[in-house]
Amino acid sequence: MKDITWSAILSVGVEEIDEDHRKLVGIFNELAHAVANGESAEYLAATFDELIKCTAWHFSHEERLMLKHRYPEIDPHRAAHRELIVAAQQLQAKLAQADQAVANAEIEYLDRWLTEHILTADQRLGSFLAQAR
């Protein structure tokens, strides 16, 4: 699995959101490396927990900005956030079972979701916030 590489394409043009995204990309890459390298279940669990907590915090941060600036697409954006949190929690529960391993396909799902969300919904949000400020 190759790393998600931060680039200008992933920037939404709002530094505080971009900063959050860079952090999430870094933690995601750490998780992908840990899975690929067969790290211990405890290490995978700790890394995955950090990713979920940081993702939930970031989503809350984005949603606060959406509320503050009365973002018209807040409902579908929130729904997308909840979808990822539920999927990540299901994967976390699977990981917690000693006989279950995280498959590359599951990591690839999270990779696609994160990058597609940034490139679509978050880009729209960034454009809106740039004009609203």
Image (cartoon, rainbow, N blue to C red):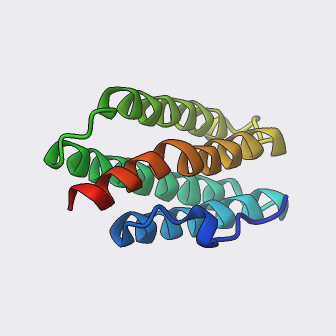
Judge by depth and name the residue closer to the eye, 21 or 90: 21
Q: Residue furthest left?
A: 68
The C terminus, quarter of image: bottom left
In the picture, residue 75 is in which quadrant? top left
Give the left or right position of residue 96, taking residue 54 as reference: right
Looking at the picture, does residue 127 appear above or below residue 90?
Answer: below
Where residue 86 appears, x then y in whole percent? 49, 29
Where residue 4 appears, x then y in whole percent? 71, 64
Q: Residue at x 34, y 32 (%)?
A: 73
Give the left or right position of residue 76, taking residue 129 as reference: right
Looking at the picture, does residue 81 appear above or below residue 57?
Answer: above
The N terminus, quarter of image: bottom right
Q: Residue furthest front?
A: 131
Give the left or right position of residue 13, taking residue 99 as reference: left
Q: Residue at x 18, y 40 (%)?
A: 70
Where residue 97 appears, x then y in whole percent? 65, 35
In the picture, residue 104 is in which quadrant? top right
Judge by depth and name the residue closer to the eye, 123 or 6: 123
Q: How many marks?
A: 0
Looking at the picture, does residue 127 appear above or below residue 26?
Answer: above
Judge by depth and name the residue closer to the eye, 73 or 60: 73
Where residue 69 appears, x then y in whole percent? 18, 48
